[in-house]
Structure formats: C-alpha cells, structure tokens
Amino acid sequence: MPQNRILAQGEVDRIGEQDAELRHTIAHKEHRQTLAMADHQAAISLILKLICNHKMGVVSDLKEIEAVGHRVVHGGDEVTGSVLVDDDVVAAIEDYTGLAPLHIPPELEAIQTLRFRLPDTPHVACFDTAFHQTIPKVAHLYALPRELYEVYGIRKYGFHGLSHRYVVSRAAELLGRRMHEINAITCHLGNGSSVTAIRNGRSVDTSMGFTPLDGLVMGSRPGNLDPGVLLYLSTKGYETKRLNEILNKRSGLFGLSGISNDMRQILTAAENGHERAQLAVDIFCYRLRKYIGAYTVILGRLDVLAFSGGIGENASRIRSETCKDLEQIGIEIDEDMNMTAVNKEADVSASTSRVKVLIIPSDEASIIAGDTYELAKGCKICPPPIHR
C-alpha cells in the first residue's frame, strides 16, 4: 500500500474438518494443500507460517506486517465505518453475536488470535453492514411494535456492504465521475445475493434485511417470504431448528430446482430441458427485475446498473434475462458483448441505453486494505463508530 499491489492471496476452506483445503497464490503460482484443520486459530497459525516461508512467503518476519484488516459481517446500529480494534470494539462485536451467530464467533476468534500473535500491530475491523447505515428510517424500519426495534434492534441492516461500496466506487471511476455524483443499482449475485439502491454514492435501500435471508432468491435461502408461512409450519410441528435448516440450507435455488444451489449446474440442467431448473432461473431473474424496477423508481435517476459476484460476473444468460424488456426504464444491453463478457470488467450497454450496464468483479479485499491502511497511518476515515 498505497499502490494496492497484491503480494499474495489465499484462503482456507472447510475449517474444522479433516479435509480442509489451503489455497495460496504468490507470483501467479498456486499452492494447494489438503490437511486436517481443527479450528480458525490453527488456520491462522498455518497462514502466518506460510507467508513467512522462504519459498512461498512475502515477509521474512511477522514484524514486517504493519497492519491487519478484518472483515466483520455485522456492526449493529452503532457502526458507521471501519474502526481500529481495541477491547471496547471486541466487546461490541461480541454484543452483535445474536444478530449473526454463524459468522461472528469465527470472526472474533480470528481477531483475538491475530491480536495475540501481532500485539503491536494495528488491527482494523471493516463491517459489511456499515455501508448501509445511510439507509433512512423509512426504508430500514419494519412495521412492528417499536419496542422490538428499541430493545432487540430488529430493523433492516443489509449485508455485502463492502462489495456494494467497491462496485459503486469503481463504476464512478469507469464513468469518469466522482462517487457522490452517481446514482446506481448494484447487484451482488452469488450463493448469497443482494441488490442495493445507491443515491449520490450512499446506500438508500438494500434487499437483505435483519438477516441475510431476506430479499433475492439465493443458493439455498428463499429471499422474500411471507412470515405467515413460518407461523403456519410451526402449527404443523416444525420447530425452530428445523425451520432454520429449511430457510438456510434447503430453500432458494436448491429448493426450487431440487438438484443444486449452484447456478452453473442449474443453467446446464435448464438447457437440457429440466423444468424445475428452468423455473428456478426464471424466478431468480423475476425477483431481481422487480428490485431493479422498484429501486429505479426510488432513485428517480439511474446512471449505472452493475453486476458483480460469481453469478453476476459469469452468467451472461442471467444478465440477459434480467434486463429483458427494461427499455422503459432506460436499460438495454448489447447481447453480443454480454455473451462474451465473462469473469472480467466490461461495459455491456447497448448504444441506445440511457443507463450504463457494467460488469464489475468485486474486490472487497481492496476496500479492507484501503481502510486498514488509512486508519493504521492515523487518517480518520469515518466518525467514531462505537458508542457503548
């Protein structure tokens, strides 16, 4: 930093399993290893050892690491931006565990482990919910008794904020304008999917809500759902644990198609005549089109429609089906350019389109690195976000 040049990158999958996989790339060479990985602490120890390795590492000693950025999924109501980590911040993140019970515990384990291993190094927490703190009350409050918000914090929070923030900032660059000068709809489409309305560079509405279950159809999550369905199922003997399993692991594209939560497999099956797979594709695109239409009305003026995420960047058919017949709101794509735009940054707008339609591969890591760099060198990039 500040050149934003990647020295190495990688990840550890299936932590807690006997067949966890490490992937590490340096100088365009990838190293893979399958091994038992007890927990996140063990994974971090392996990563630190690897980046100091004389053959595959990028530093000779951990003291060369000048800052560490952490992605945290939920910052509750208090967090308005990235923040230097101290004991109060850790305690605040612990308070948010109930809002993201699957994500916060391993994130805390990573933060605590790295703070222990690198005690004299600045650590920065970057929150996925922070970008959406600009959403007004008219969009983030639910029509529930007010005490449920005041006591339990039940409101729309939104997620994928780091991705949406990167995409709109990059879209502004591609248009030769500043971020606060454009209105955009950004579509982060993957196993988890969300769409955000951005006015003058600030999030004003987003599809995910109190949890990541709301909004678009996703890989195994249903998106928008009448809560009465859950009340009805509870009268039929469905307990909370079973309902949680249905909502998080058996719904969405998987529930609709009956074959997979992977859009690639579903598209292939649909092309081969699988009716349920085709219906899953149709419902996915239909839901996304509804959000694009609604958010266009909310914004009043739309400059950019951007696609990112594994599906958004690679599934040309999904982009085509989603944008079909949206000429009335100024969205037209060039089908030939769209078909060849796979896994790369591209402008697929038709020459007659009033709205720029862009494919922008998301780079959340660069947002985390940028915030971490600025905070670590003492630059204040946001208001104090923790008020305990």
Image (cartoon, helix red, strand yellow):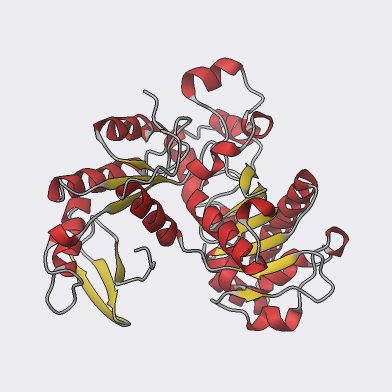
Q: Quadrant of the N terminus?
A: bottom left
Q: Is residue 276 above or below residue 158?
A: below
The residue shown at (16%, 47%) is: 120
Count of numbered marks: 0
Would residue 216 be seen by someone viewing this image from the given angle? no
Horizontal and vertical percent position of residue 49: 13, 65
Report the side of 123 relative to 191 (left or right). Answer: left
Task: Report whether residue 358 is seen.
Answer: yes
Indicate the quadrant containing the C terminus: top left, top right, bottom left or bottom right.
top left
35 or 296: nearer the viewer: 296
Residue 257 pos. (x, y %)? 60, 62
Q: Is residue 27 above or below residue 367?
A: below
Taking depth in this image into account, of 319 and 248 the one nearest to the observer is 319
Q: Is residue 323 left or right of residue 362?
A: right
Q: Is residue 289 left or right of residue 364?
A: right
Residue 169 occupies quadrant: bottom right
Residue 102 in which image quadrant = top left
Residue 266 in percent (x, y) is at 58, 70
Determine the residue positioned at 48% across, 18% down.
Answer: 151
> Which residue is at the far right?
328
Tell me where residue 23 appears, x and y as whole percent: 28, 71
Please report the residue visible at 14 percent of the width from the left and 45 percent of the height from the top.
116
**Of the pair 40 and 185, the residue shown nearer to us:** 185
Task: Say which residue appears at 19% left-offset and 68% top-offset.
Answer: 51
